[in-house]
Amino acid sequence: MEDQQGLIESLIEKGEQYGKTTIELLKLKTLDKSADVVSNIVSWSIVIILAVLFFLILNIGVALWLGELLGKSYYGFFVVSGFYALLVIVFAIFRKQLIKNPVNNSIVTQVLE
């Protein structure tokens, strides 16, 4: 009888250890995935910021160049802004296909990796 009680206590103790280990493993996996997602977001944010600065300076140069060709510097800025207005319309119409779905798929793929 005492032997069975000792076995039951041992089994309960091992079950508790298994539960604690499983919870700890889940915490570590969650932390790993969170760190991976955050580091990916930070690294892409830096790339995006640098790309935006590059394109901003490039657009100013193109606008000044077009303005010189058209006779008035502000004409070049109107042409460049008209181009971006056209891009805004295209992206507004196709935003789900071009932006939302690929970003969602990328995040889900990264989390489930």
Image (spheres, rainbow, N blue to C red):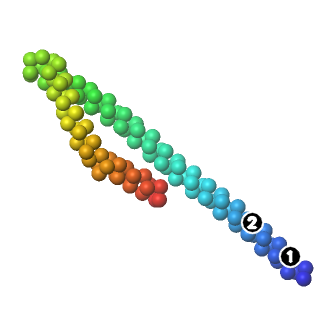
Instruction: Kindly identify which numbered label has been placed on residue 60.
Output: none
Question: Vertical placement of 54 versus 8: above or below?
Answer: above
Camera-side residue: 45 or 98? 98
Q: Which residue is mark 2?
A: 16
The residue under label 1 is: 6
Determine whether 48 is above or below 81 in the image: below
CA neighbours of label 1 inside 10 A, class few (<14), some (14 to 19), many (20+): few
Does 2 appear above or below 102?
below
Image quadrant where residue 72 sits: top left
Using residue 3 as the reference point, say whether residue 113 is left or right of it: left
Residue 8: quadrant of the picture: bottom right
Quadrant where the N terminus sits is bottom right
Residue at 70 percent across and 66 percent down: it is 18
Going by the numbered disc 1, the residue's amino acid type is: Gly
Count all numbered tags in the image, as a single digit. 2
Residue at left offset 20%, top offset 36%: 86
Front-lying residue, 108 or 85:
85
Q: Residues within 10 Å of mark 2 (few under 14, many from 20)?
A: few
Secondary structure state at the residue bearing disc 2: helix
Q: Is residue 112 above or below residue 81?
A: below
Q: Residue 93 at x, y = what percent? A: 25, 45
Single out the residue that lies furthest toward the top: 72
Gap between marks 1 and 2, in whole Å? 15 Å
Q: Is residue 73 visible?
A: yes
Mark 1 and mark 2 lie on one chain; the one further toward the N terminus is: 1
Q: Position of residue 81 (x, y in %)?
A: 21, 28
Residue type at mark 2: give it: Glu
Q: Secondary structure at mark 1?
A: helix
